[in-house]
Image: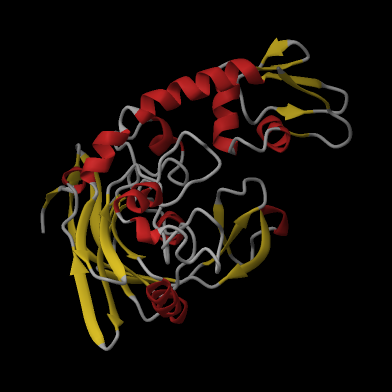
Amino acid sequence: MYIRHRHTGKGGRLDVILSRKAPDFSREDIKRAIREGFVTVNSDVVTKPGRTISDGEFVEMNLMRFKKSFYQNAAGYQSDIEQITQQIDIIAEYPDFLVVNKPAGLLVHQTHNPHDISLVDILTKWYPEMHGVGESFTEQNRSGIVHRIDKDTSGLLVVARTEHGYRNLKQQFKNRTVKKEYMAIVRGTLSSAFGQITYNVARSKTDHTRRTVVTEETPKRQYSGTPRKAHTEYEVVAYGTWHTIPVTNVRVWLHTGRTHQIRLHFKAIGHPLLGDKMYGGKWEKYESPAVRQLLHASRLAFTYNGETYDFSVDIPEEMKIVGSG
């Protein structure tokens, strides 16, 4: 089984072209397929995702071989699911909601990859009454989810168990009355002990999984849709080293909740999150000893039925630095 494409018209990136032809896979998956030799251009193997495809060139991807490789790797991932499941910590349990400490490496809800397991999959088995909660208000397979953190971000989430809980909590997030606090390890030494970052954010025009910072100088061809205001506040907790790398440990508050906001904002000021393969540049992608972005949702506070709830969890072991205070 092959994907075959005779390109016509304006030139384009190989990974972008193939992403349109194989919608079941993300652009990162397609890049992997190219790098691992599953793609040819004019019958020659090409391993650079950014290779420009010109008018008249013939692209072919061995989809069957790639799927076999993809799902074999998925089977290896599945072997780690039990271990990841054991790391899920139910911090608090109430009739209308749960508070969960999610480990890094676990999706909040499923995406296009059928082999992945998510927090929703696990919680709906443990709490069957959650199944379908909130799905009349949003997409399916997101039972009880009122907010999210990235797969490779660890930390606190509140999850609804009932429709009443879902509506109440969802409205609080919409009104921005929920207090969220994060801990992050950023590369380098921040010059200011306190700071505000207010760059606007929009969806990348070349990759739907990415977001981009938008300023007055940003060309329209780099983003799609209307840029949205994003406001991040931080304070330095400690300066130090992580595996000999100079880093800064920061406490972060979100005043808006844009996708990838913290990761984008610290990249924009020249201090990307350690281990951020998507936004940290070539060094983070290929050389950083961190296997994931070192970001942790450490505190969550909200009210419910007139009572105040305030939860906090320590950072995971892999985020501890040798600090100088």
Instruction: Give the number of callouts.
Output: 0
The structure residue drawn at horizontal position 26% and vertical position 58%, both measured from the top left corner, is: 100
Determine which quarter of the picture holds residue 197.
Answer: bottom left
307 left or right, relative to 233:
left
* Residue 61 shows up from this direction: yes
On-image quarter of the N terminus: top right
In the rendering, at what x and y percent does residue 139 appear?
56, 59
In the rendering, at what x and y percent does residue 148 appear?
41, 59
Determine which quarter of the picture holds residue 75.
Answer: top left
Judge whether 153 appears above or below 160 on screen: above
207 left or right, relative to 294:
right
Determine which quarter of the picture holds residue 213.
Answer: bottom right
On-image quarter of the C terminus: bottom left
- Residue at the front extreme, as displayed: 129
Judge whether 1 appears above or below 293 on screen: above
Q: How is the image coloured?
A: secondary structure
In the rendering, at what x and y percent does residue 180 appear?
31, 70
The structure residue drawn at horizontal position 23% and vertical position 64%, both measured from the top left corner, is: 236
Asked whether 304 or 223 is in front, the reply is 304
- Residue at the top extreme, as displayed: 43
In the rendering, at what x and y percent does residue 68 appear?
54, 18
* Residue 38 shows up from this direction: no
The structure residue drawn at horizontal position 44% and vertical position 61%, both measured from the top left corner, is: 265
The structure residue drawn at horizontal position 43% and vertical position 72%, both measured from the top left corner, is: 163
